[in-house]
Amino acid sequence: MPSTRRDRYLILGSPPLGPRAPKNNTVAKLTKAVTADGVLDHLEALQAVADANGGNRASGLPGYKASVDYVVGQLREAGYTPQVQAFTFDYFEENSELIRVSPNPRTFVNGTDFLRNTFDSGTPEGTATGPLVPVDLVLNPSGPANSSSSGCEAADFAGFTAGSVALVQRGTCGFNVKVLNAQAAGASAVIVMNEGQPGRTGLVSMIGDATGLHIPAVFTTFELIS
């Protein structure tokens, strides 16, 4: 999830004075002035802003700025003198990709073919490209479940070429153990595939404490790799 800094806006409005001063000076009068039709008009206007800006009004994107402009315009029409103050905040955007460059180039679908990790210690940012290196896999869907020890021991990575993408398999030890062992062996990234037995073919969220992990790690279906 790449992070960046984005601007948000705080709108402050000075109330109109003189003849244009609002008459809604009590809670009862203000409540009466707010109608369902009026609220829907504003919602439709903001939805139109989203439709014209890629389907959203997220902070820091053009739709957000257009929304601010709309609110400012409405306040000015009502006789207020709005002031817009900008401030920055940390922004995180999900941008998980898994791509096979060769052979047969293919871009896999996040949430269907793979999932990024959800380790308790956080999800490292970054990208990696390298040859895929299987690590002690047991591709035997008819065998006993939860029996693959792929990536569970440092010895599994004997002869592993640093900079490669490690392919390990779900099995007898935690996901965090596998990915940390791969990192220690010099992997630039880790792909953990499901084991293959009935009920162990789809996607699973990788959890656990992977403190110290700083390389990308994703989980894939058994079918995707096998």
Image (spheres, helix red, strand yellow):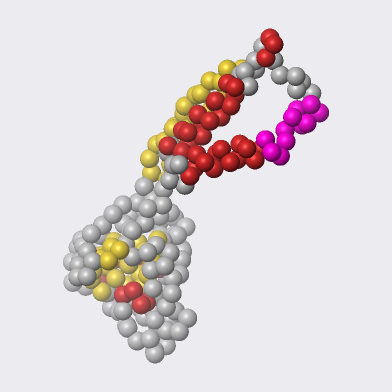
Which range is magenta? Answer: 27-38
Which corner quadrant of the image does residue 121 belong to? bottom left
Task: Verify whether residue 34 appears in magenta.
Answer: yes
Q: 39 or 14, which lies in front? A: 39
Q: Residue furthest right?
A: 28
Please say if 59 is above or below 157.
above
Q: Is residue 112 left or right of residue 11?
A: left
Instruction: Residue 49: tell me if it is visible.
Output: yes
User: How many numbered marks have been drawn onto this rendered protein structure?
Assistant: 0
Q: Is residue 150 left or right of residue 121?
A: left
Q: Residue at x 38, y 40 (%)?
A: 4
Q: Is residue 155 left or right of residue 116?
A: left
Q: 146 or 24, which lies in front? A: 24
Q: Residue at x 37, y 53 (%)?
A: 95
Q: Main secondary structure of the magenta part?
A: helix
Residue 112 image point, x, y percent: 42, 67
Residue 209 image point, x, y percent: 44, 60
Q: Residue at x 62, y 37 (%)?
A: 41
In the rendered image, the quadrant that contains the C terminus is bottom left
Which corner quadrant of the image does residue 113 belong to? bottom left
Q: Is residue 130 left or right of residue 42?
A: left
Q: Residue at x 33, y 54 (%)?
A: 214
Q: 44 or 108, which lies in front? A: 44
Task: Verify whether residue 149 appears in magenta.
Answer: no
Q: 56 or 116, which lies in front? A: 56
